[in-house]
Image (cartoon, rainbow, N blue to C red):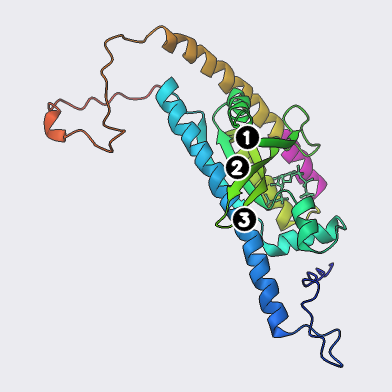
Amino acid sequence: MNRVRALQPTPGAHDHSPGNQDRVSIDDVRALREQFFDFMLGYKFAIDEITTKINILREDFNNTHEYNPIEHVGSRLKSPESVLEKVQRKNYPMNLASIRENVLDIAGVRVVCSFISDIALIRDMLVGQEDITLLEERDYITHRKPNGYQSLHLIVSIPVFRSNRTDRMPVEIQIRTIAMDFWASLEHKIYYKYSGEVPSNLQSDLAQAAEVAAQLDEKMEALHSQVDRTADTQHSPLDSLDLSKLYGLTADPADTPPGPRISRPRPR
Ligand code: 0O2
């Protein structure tokens, strides 16, 4: 296994006392740690910015269209070990400037949608925002990976307003359906269990499962658009104006007339 190379200290931060040219002092280590913490904090703020944007879209979309295309939003900040492992694997120079320039997935946000058509919807709503710049796009849905992986990956940059400066930070946004997410999380576990050397029978089972997941997505999409067409014709102009959600109020149960609970067996 490769050993991760150490991060180079800030130039000029060495202990230069005689005989100590190559030794790193405790102050160097402390300074490096603070620098790295500040560096990573910027990515954490970038995740917060993107997550807020997605939550706003979710709430607004729900309000405007009475439909919520976002099932789940998750995020992760790449661990220092994974950042350093990637720098080493890709042979990038081991310093903060190089990491900033080359490792664009330190901040990661994952959006899980209900239907395939929601993916483009979310993508366009995010990329269309004034302060978001699209840096890179990888469409693993149109071009499924050989192992079956499907997802839309965007690398975007957004401004993060710090106390003394504004930094434009990259964020990797992965957008996928529930079925794609289900597949990817299992494949991820299998991949790590076998340290990347997945036996060929499992590989072909995974590829088959990815095909089934893709077929399920298509089927659900078709059902969804049928239901959508029906719902369009069933809107009542007498719908009441209910602002309770806006103010965090819930209806007083005393206002609800008691009635029998009717439970119908679900057809099997
Ligand atoms: P984690 O734990 O999700 O952060 P590289 O980082 O070099 O491997 P690259 O070229 O930067 O990859 O980007 P790529 O392949 O477009 O996307 C990398 C990320 O996408 C991975 O991050 C995974 O989250 C996801 N991904 C890509 N391919 C697969 C796959 O085959 N299976 C699964 N389950 N996920 C995949 P990390 O950092 O590897 O992992």
To which residue does mark 3 refer?
A: 42
> Mark 1, residues whose alpha carbon is within 10 Å: few (<14), some, or many (≥20)?
many
Tell which residue pokes out farthest to the front in this image.
164
| Element under disc 3 | helix
To which residue does mark 2 refer?
A: 110
The reply to whether dot 1 and dot 2 touch (C-beta < 8 Å) is yes
Task: Please report the bounds of the magenta region as a residue range.
Answer: 198-209
Displayed quadrant of residue 253:
top left
Name the spot of residue 247 as percent of width and height, x first: 28, 36
Q: Which three-letter amino acid code belongs to the residue tagged 3?
A: Gly
Q: Which three-letter amino acid code belongs to the residue tagged 2?
A: Arg
Q: Which three-letter amino acid code belongs to the residue tagged 1?
A: Arg
Kindly tell me whether residue 143 is visible in this rendering. yes
2 sits left or right of 105 in the view: right
Q: Does the magenta portion include 47?
A: no
The response on whether ligand 1 sits within 8 Å of label 2 is: yes
Q: Nearer the viewer, residue 163 or 85?
A: 163
State how far apart marks 3 and 2 are (Cα).
18 Å
Q: Nearer the viewer, mark 3 or mark 2?
A: 3
Label number found at residue 43: none
The response on whether ligand 1 sits within 8 Å of label 1 is: no
Name the spot of residue 220 as percent of width and height, x first: 56, 22
| Element under disc 1 | strand
Q: Residue at x 28, y 15 (%)?
A: 239
To which residue does mark 1 refer?
A: 176
Q: Nearer the viewer, residue 59 or 93?
A: 93
State how far apart marks 1 and 2 are (Cα).
8 Å
Name the spot of residue 179 as percent of width and height, x first: 60, 34
Name the spot of residue 8 as percent of width and height, x first: 80, 70
State how far apart marks 3 and 1 are (Cα).
26 Å
